[in-house]
Image: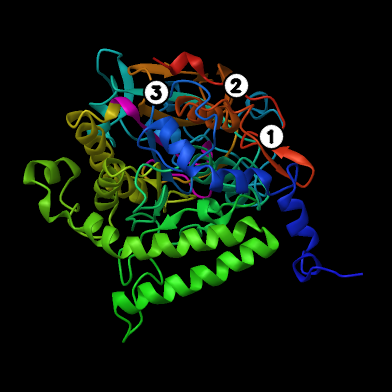
């Protein structure tokens, strides 16, 4: 019996990827549907047929992620009654048996540490904001402040993995990858999903960041985030090797593409198509990335919005400006991970430095987007992976204190693209320890982001390991409609 060598070479994985109901069918279909998707949505290319599910209010998103967990009661969640509780023990009726990290579970006491920072009302909304955030305080009428976020994860790695990928365990696709996969890109010369990790001024012993936080997980690798660096090659392995000019590089890529296309025809593995697309993207980025990063064309009045560090590559101010330039050029999702917020001690020393890093640049980004007419269709999100405890970790004094991890409540804000400004959603108890009104889970946050981008989180699925995977998982999630315009 004659056997076609191509059939003999067919792996089990490749077989399933080539069947209409196989694990890779959705990814392969999305790669082959680029032309039709582009005509359906005008300037967008790639993405899935049938998306968006409804009219999107945001075309793109910028996520300012404060890695390490900002102290909500020192910044956004004013608790004036705590001044009378200084150095008193946290009542058991408030703690309610909540599990603790190993960093404070051995403490003999849990003394209350009131915030030393003054709060004042701002904007027509009268939102209370800390003196640490003078620039963002002026933006309260443009943001929706959510004080009732919560998660089940109590340690950094599972918590940040959870909010970025929808699961505490590694291996799932990140939010940016889902958006890139579903909606495609508006600029074929830049990735749909870009990531930056700026410097920070607070505690130097910061939590590590992992590529999986912007990884594609089970989705084809072309949808993973591309990290833009401030030193050396801005994108790793983007530059041509010594002695290889662009003409030679082009011939090499053409030859490699023919080999990969032959492999794709034999095995039908979507990853081969992804590899071809990534090589071509890298070639185009050799021109587009330097142009993106050259801010010499920015007028001084725009630079001034972001603060004095905006021209220093790798600072938070510089990355915020870069995020606006990416949004302008059609990058679908930009995520900035700012480290140094894990303040178990020395909050009065480190927190003001962290706030100075991000306050003016965050406000400047909102102003810049608004002046360009882009804020209405650009979603901006600010927040971390969980909150901090009202009780002190370690020694407590009137001028120094620290706080442990607290997953039961924390604060984030959203602005632009379909978000109602001047709104405060949710409420915590007087200790900023438990949510007493309108809880918002991290799944709800992701469902809301998808909704604003035109995606129904319940219908947005990808088959993997026998399950229809979703960013919001299998548990109930809801769109926080109370903060939408």
Task: Tell me which colouring the rendered structure shows.
Answer: rainbow
Query: Which label sits on residue 34?
Result: none
Where does label 3 land, which residue? 57
Q: Is residue 473 left or right of residue 241?
A: right
Depth order, front residue of 390/49: 49
Asked if labels 1 and 3 touch by Cβ distance under 8 angstroms, the answer is no
| Residue situated furthest right in the rendering | 1
Disc 2: CA contacts within 10 A as few (<14), some (14-19) or many (>=20): some
Disc 3: CA contacts within 10 A as few (<14), some (14-19) or many (>=20): many
Across and down, in percent, residue 405 comes to 56, 43
Depth order, front residue of 192/151: 192
Where does label 1 land, which residue? 98
Across and down, in percent, residue 358 comes to 30, 44
Q: Tell me where the magenta segment starts and ends, as one range.
A: 376-398
Across and down, in percent, residue 390 comes to 51, 34
| Residue situated furthest bottom in the rendering | 243
């Amino acid at each position: 019996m004659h056997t076609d060598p191509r059939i003999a070479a067919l792996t089990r994985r490749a077989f399933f990827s080539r069947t209409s109901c196989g694990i890779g069918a959705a990814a392969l279909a999305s790669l082959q549907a680029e032309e039709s998707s582009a005509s359906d949505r005008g300037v967008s290319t790639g993405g899935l047929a049938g998306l968006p599910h409804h009219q999107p209010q945001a075309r793109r998103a910028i996520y300012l992620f404060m890695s390490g967990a900002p102290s909500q009661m020192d910044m956004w969640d004013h608790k004036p009654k705590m001044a009378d509780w200084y150095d008193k023990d946290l009542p058991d009726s408030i703690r309610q048996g909540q599990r603790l990290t190993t960093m404070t579970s051995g403490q003999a006491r849990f003394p209350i540490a009131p915030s030393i920072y003054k709060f004042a009302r701002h904007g027509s909304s009268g939102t209370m904001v800390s003196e640490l955030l003078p620039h963002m305080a002026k933006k309260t009428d443009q943001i929706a402040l959510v004080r009732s976020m919560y998660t089940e994860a109590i340690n950094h790695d599972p918590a940040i993995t959870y909010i970025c990928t929808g699961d505490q365990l590694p291996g799932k696709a990140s939010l940016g990858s889902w958006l890139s996969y579903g909606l495609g890109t508006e600029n074929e010369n830049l990735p749909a999903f870009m990531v930056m990790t700026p410097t920070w001024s607070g505690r130097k012993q910061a939590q590590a960041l992992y590529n999986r936080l912007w990884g594609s997980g089970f989705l084809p690798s072309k949808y993973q985030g591309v990290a833009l660096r401030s030193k050396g090659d801005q994108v790793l392995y983007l530059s041509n090797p010594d002695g290889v000019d662009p003409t030679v590089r082009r011939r090499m890529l053409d030859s490699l593409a023919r080999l990969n296309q032959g492999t794709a025809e034999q095995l039908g593995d979507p990853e081969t198509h992804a590899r071809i697309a990534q090589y071509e993207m890298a070639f185009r980025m050799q021109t587009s990335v330097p142009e993106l990063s050259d801010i010499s064309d920015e007028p001084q009045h725009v630079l001034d919005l972001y603060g004095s560090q905006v021209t220093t590559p790798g600072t938070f101010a510089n990355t915020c400006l870069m995020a606006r330039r990416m949004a302008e050029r059609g990058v679908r999702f930009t995520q900035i991970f700012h480290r140094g917020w894990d303040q178990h001690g020395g909050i009065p020393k480190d927190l003001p430095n962290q706030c100075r890093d991000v306050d003016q640049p965050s406000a400047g980004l909102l102003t810049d987007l608004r002046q360009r007419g882009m804020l209405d269709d650009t979603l901006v999100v600010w927040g971390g992976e969980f909150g901090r405890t009202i009780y002190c970790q370690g020694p407590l004094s009137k001028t120094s204190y620290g706080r442990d991890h607290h997953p039961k409540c924390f604060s984030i804000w959203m602005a632009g693209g379909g978000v109602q400004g001047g709104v405060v959603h949710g409420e915590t108890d007087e200790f900023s320890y438990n949510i007493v009104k309108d809880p918002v889970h991290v799944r709800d946050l992701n469902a809301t982001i998808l909704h604003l981008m035109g995606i129904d989180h319940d219908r947005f699925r990808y088959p993997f390991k026998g399950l229809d995977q979703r960013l919001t998982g299998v548990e109930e999630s809801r769109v926080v409609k109370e903060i939408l315009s």
